[in-house]
Amino acid sequence: MSRVVLDTNVYISAFLFGGVPGALIAVARAGVAELMVSPPILEETAGILRRRFGFTRAQVAEVMREIRSLARLITPDLHRAVIREDEPDNRVLECAVAAGADYIGSGDRRHLLPLRVYEGIPILPPAVLLRVLQAQTPTSES
């Protein structure tokens, strides 16, 4: 089973709009991939839901419960300063390295996706990551 770290923007899109990011959550729920998340990723997600999208405390708490039920909480021990233009993106990299992630899923075309790979971990847009994970799903014919 692949270990996956999702960027905040993927969680936000999944819970607001569904689509491909929602399908990534469904893949994790089905046990095809194991999500890894860190406290800073959770905090950033909660803050964006509150500030930008007007979620109530109860709504944010529900999203946080859902993510925590699907993801293993990782506490990175090393600080990264790879992306200077958007410091919170470094938290995604820290989590992925600490988790021994197989993939990072992000829609961030300005900072994370241009890296392509970080310390051997491919950084993929959600649609590509979904195809990769679905290809790893055993079929009933196998």
Image: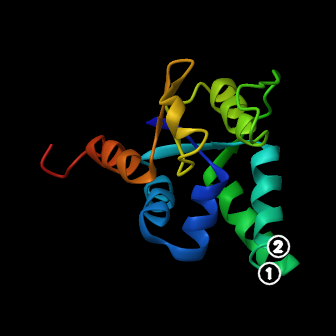
Left or right: where 20 falls relative to 64 = left
For label 2, the SS is: helix
Instruction: Tell how many labels.
Output: 2
Q: Are marks 1 and 2 in contact (CB under 8 Å)?
A: yes
In the picture, the quarter occupied by the C terminus is top left
User: In the rendered image, which residue does mark 2 sit on?
Assistant: 50
Amino acid at circle 2: Arg
- Residue at image point 38% right, 53% down: 127
Amino acid at circle 1: Gly
- Residue at image point 53% right, 47% down: 109
User: In the rendered image, which residue does mark 1 sit on?
Assistant: 54
Where is residue 95 drawn, in percent x and y? 70, 33
Where is residue 131 drawn, in percent x and y? 31, 48
- Residue at image point 42% right, 63% down: 20
Left or right: where 127 falls relative to 26 = left
Few, some or many residues within 10 Å of mark 1 (<14, 14–19, 20+): few
Where is residue 79 drawn, in percent x and y? 82, 24
Few, some or many residues within 10 Å of mark 2 (<14, 14–19, 20+): some
